[in-house]
Image: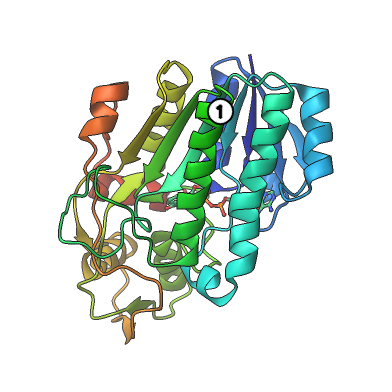
Amino acid sequence: MKILITGGAGFIGSHIADACLNKGYEVVIIDNLTTGTRNNVHKNAVFYKADIRDTKRVARIFSKEKPDIVNHHAALASVTESVENPAETLEVNVVGTVNLLVAGVAHGLQKFIFSSTGGAIYGDIEHIPTPETVEAQPPSPYGLSKLLAERVIRYYGKEYSLPYVIFRYANVYGPRQNPHGEAGVIAIFAETMKQNKQPIIFGDGNKTRDYVYVEDIVDANMRALDCDKNILVNLGRGEEIKDQVVFDTIARALEYTQHPQYAPVRAGEMLRSALSTSAAHNELGWQPVTDFEDGIEKTIASY
Ligand code: NAD
């Protein structure tokens, strides 16, 4: 069985690639290294430095590799950057997804697994933890790009009988998360504290997110390989954690004693978020096993 992982040089995709290789799958990776790095790529994976927007290149790779499964993690994943440059985010996250689907259908693809967002798709609503049945009203071009990509995947599911699993992730964290971007608050806070600088909390510290450890996300992706239904499910822990608690937990683990700086909430950001994950439990038997404190400890130990 051959699995093509886009974004396999990035944070989550590289962990999934490692798990697939451990399970005996052949792994092919497409990544243009925008935020990913070659160091994250397992030596036994076949690596193509390529851009998923490049229709012809993607078609050539599929024609050569003929993957059985695509696990699609390549994306521009910053809410803030998507507000500043919506066209690029939509191009990578939507047109890039279309290119993979077209090439997949042309070359006998059997399943498409997709990393959407639950943290940036529902908008500011009262229904928390949020189930998948709530209408997505993304407040940013990033969230919108993921919703559009989901719709295209479901279209291919219906019109071309391409089986799919769509995951809407909460905030994922863990080893290898890039601390230099706009997204990934845990990696950013930890890196800033290690440099003895002051992390910035956007808002008053009461903004909430649902944090899920990367190993739990990998577990769901591995379960998706055996799933024989088309599903769209949230993956999170269903627990709202305040920015201030994130700061305090990392500070404690790193014995950091300074205070954070506070700045206004950025455009496109939601104030509260936590996901209901009973559908993932029902469909895949999945549930997260790493609690927040343990996940932070494991992440920090990996530095
Ligand atoms: P990441 O930035 O580490 O990984 C994304 C990868 O995609 C990078 O390696 C990057 O180089 C690659 N990439 C970007 N544009 C590309 C292009 N045009 N062509 C080929 N490769 C390209 O981010 P991540 O946190 O690992 O996120 C992986 C996926 O999960 C993304 O689709 C993201 O939207 C989704 N997701 C992440 C989170 C989270 O909390 N980390 C939450 C919800 C959804």
The image shows residue 231, relative to residue 149, as above or below, that is above
Q: Could you tell me which residue is drawn at 21 percent across and 49 percent down?
A: 130
Q: Nearer the viewer, residue 58 or 257?
A: 58
At x 37%, y 56%, the residue is 121
Q: Is residue 92 left or right of residue 251?
A: right
Q: Is residue 14 visible?
A: yes
Determine the residue located farthest toward the front in the rendered image.
Answer: 159
Query: In the drawing, does residue 296 fall left or right of residue 164?
Result: left
Across and down, in percent, residue 54 comes to 78, 48
Q: At 31% across and 85% down in the image, what residue appears?
A: 262
Q: Residues within 10 Å of mark 1 (few under 14, many from 20)?
A: few
* Scheme of image coloration: rainbow
Q: Is residue 241 above or below residue 167?
A: below
Label 1, secondary structure: give it: helix
Provide the residue designation for mark 1. 159
Q: Mark 1 belongs to which amino acid?
A: Glu
Along the viewing direction, whichever of 103 and 239 lies nearer the viewer: 103
Residue 65 located left or right of residue 8: right
**Is residue 112 visible to us here?**
no
Please identify the quarter of the rendering in which residue 101 is found: top right
Q: Position of residue 256 (x, y in %)?
A: 32, 71
Q: Residue 207 at what x, y percent from top left?
A: 24, 70
Is residue 117 depicted above or below 277 in this figure? Answer: below
Residue 212 x/y as whole percent? 32, 46
Look at 57% across and 30% down and name the residue there.
18
* Total numbered labels placed on residues in the image: 1
Q: Quadrant of the N terminus?
A: top right
CB at disc 1 and ligand 1 closer than 8 Å: no
